[in-house]
Image (cartoon, rainbow, N blue to C red):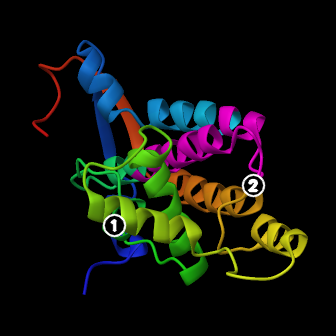
Amino acid sequence: MSETFETKLSRVAGTIHHVAIDDQHRRYRDSLLYYSNKAERLHDAATALGGDPFGHHFEAFALLAGFSIEVLIKGTLTGLREKVPFKHNLVSLSEAAGLAISNDDRSVLKALTVYTTWYSRYPAATGARETIEGMEVLRAPYPRAGNLGKIAERVRTSPAALNDKSYERLYEFYRSRFFDVQSSVYESAGWSWELPDA
């Protein structure tokens, strides 16, 4: 069984998180402030586009929404001194941080992963199987039959479907966990040759 977020947080609480100010790459990669600022800008842009699943800008909204959550999770992992995986699967990133999520949240994160990895960026995924599986994830919250108005309303309000309400709920959850980490560690800037080896 993997460690919980609370266990990981207790291990780093009260420690110093060192950031090299003379190395631009390390400064951006390691500083929690940069993760916070980037996530906030992506969130603001996603919110400006609107999260109506039937809206004209929904794919762009989903792309930015997914990126904002990915940045928060990866910033959380950075602050927890966990290895940040080079992947975009939001469910597995959340699990790497030890964060427990509901089935509804898991569904939304799966949809955001499909949007960020290919659906909002390319006409198809890299393989036929990934395309088919991704389309199944995106179609899951849609009832197979019924009144179109009722179907649309259900998708706009369902906690298991990607919409503005489910995104805001998830964004606030991950922002709060990020803040838990950011407020539990002390961030210190210094010259790279003065910092302890990371």
Q: Residues within 10 Å of mark 2 (few under 14, many from 20)?
A: many
Q: Position of residue 72 (x, y in %)?
A: 48, 48
User: As rendered, which of 48 and 43 lies closer to the eye?
Assistant: 48
Is residue 103 within the magenta segment?
A: no
Q: Position of residue 179 (x, y in %)?
A: 55, 51
Q: Quadrant of residue 68?
A: top right
Helix, strand or loop at mark 2 = helix
The residue to which callout 1 is attached is 92
Which residue reaches farthest bottom? Answer: 1
**Start-end of magenta stretch:** 45-73
Is residue 62 within the magenta segment?
A: yes
Can the viewer see residue 84? yes
Q: On the picture, is 113 further left or further right than 7?
A: right
Residue sitting at x 33%, y 66%: 92
> Mark 2: which amino acid?
Asp
Alpha carbon distance from label 2 to label 1: 22 Å
Helix, strand or loop at mark 1 = helix
28 over 52 or under it: above or below: above
Q: Which mark is residue 164?
A: 2
